[in-house]
Image: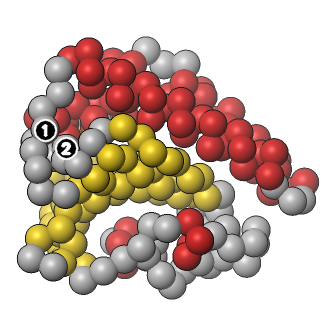
Amino acid sequence: MSLTLLIYVNSNSYTLHKNDGKVYFLEWRKATTSSIANEVSGAVGSDEKSLYKNRLAAFNSREGLAKIEKSLRYKFWQKLDQDNVFAKNFYILETMNSGEMVTFENRVIYLDRGEFVVDVYSYNPRTKEWIKYKSFRKPEFSLDREQNKVTFKTGLIHDDIIVSKFQGLKVLSVDYYVTTTIKKKGGVNVSLLK
């Protein structure tokens, strides 16, 4: 399983105080859990409902029950603070897929001269650190739910994707897409995940 986190950021810097960071992080965690729970209740068929229930249990096991300091999401949140990434508006996109080896990659996206720069971070389990290891540019993309959500089993992306929207570190929305519910063409596409 791999976890990819993608963040779109405006240009202003913001540094968190330790307690503020935990508060914002916990709001994000709660919004993510609520999003998955909403998808469970809104799922049309039993297969889709079962997948969302599974994802909710897995998320709660991995993130919801863990002490905040042990959370990989929180460690990345702290790394963003250290790197002065926070700004007025940004998105976080997480992609989870199963594989032989568990890997975690996070992406930070910010606007620079009319293009989005994607900085890719990887979590090293040996050093227990997030490391930025590459960057590339994208002219445009969209993370709007209306442009990306499709009926279960009609989408072409076979990963679970979580899109979180923030304004000034306050989480505004979280959308959880289970496998095959997001279209391949559009903003959330394979080229952003490479």
Q: Quadrant of residue 20?
A: top left
Q: Is residue 160 above or below residue 193?
A: above
**Is 37 on the left-hand or right-hand side of 70?**
right
Disc 2 to disc 1: CB gap under 8 Å: yes
Residue 128 seen in render: no
Where residue 73 sits in the image (x, y, percent)?
Answer: 37, 35
Q: Quadrant of the C terminus?
A: bottom left
Instruction: Name the image colouring.
Output: secondary structure
Residue displayed at 21% across by 72% down: 116
- Residue 70, horizontal then vertical, whole percent: 37, 21
Which residue occupies 17% across, 20% down?
Answer: 17
Residue type, label 2: Phe
Horizontal and vertical percent position of residue 11: 12, 57
Q: Which residue is mark 1?
A: 14
Q: Is residue 24 above or below residue 105?
A: above
Determine whether 169 is above or below 146 in the image: above
The residue indicated by pointer 2 is 86
Query: Residue 47 lies in what quarter of the image?
Result: bottom right
Quick one: 4 or 11, which is closer to the camera? Answer: 11
Say which of 118 and 149 sits in front.
149
**Callout 1 amino acid:** Tyr
Residues 50 and 14: in front is 14
| Real-space CA distance between mark 2 and mark 1, rounded to the nearest whole angstrom | 5 Å
Q: Is residue 182 left or right of residue 166?
A: right
Mark 2 secondary-structure assignment: loop
Q: Position of residue 132 (x, y in %)?
A: 15, 52
Query: What residue appears at the point 89 percent right and 59 percent down from the top-left corner?
Result: 45
Secondary element at image label 1: loop
Q: Residues within 10 Å of mark 1 (few under 14, many from 20)?
A: some
Q: Could you tell whether 43 is left or right of 38 in the image?
A: right
Query: Would you say 60 lies left or right of 44 here?
Result: left
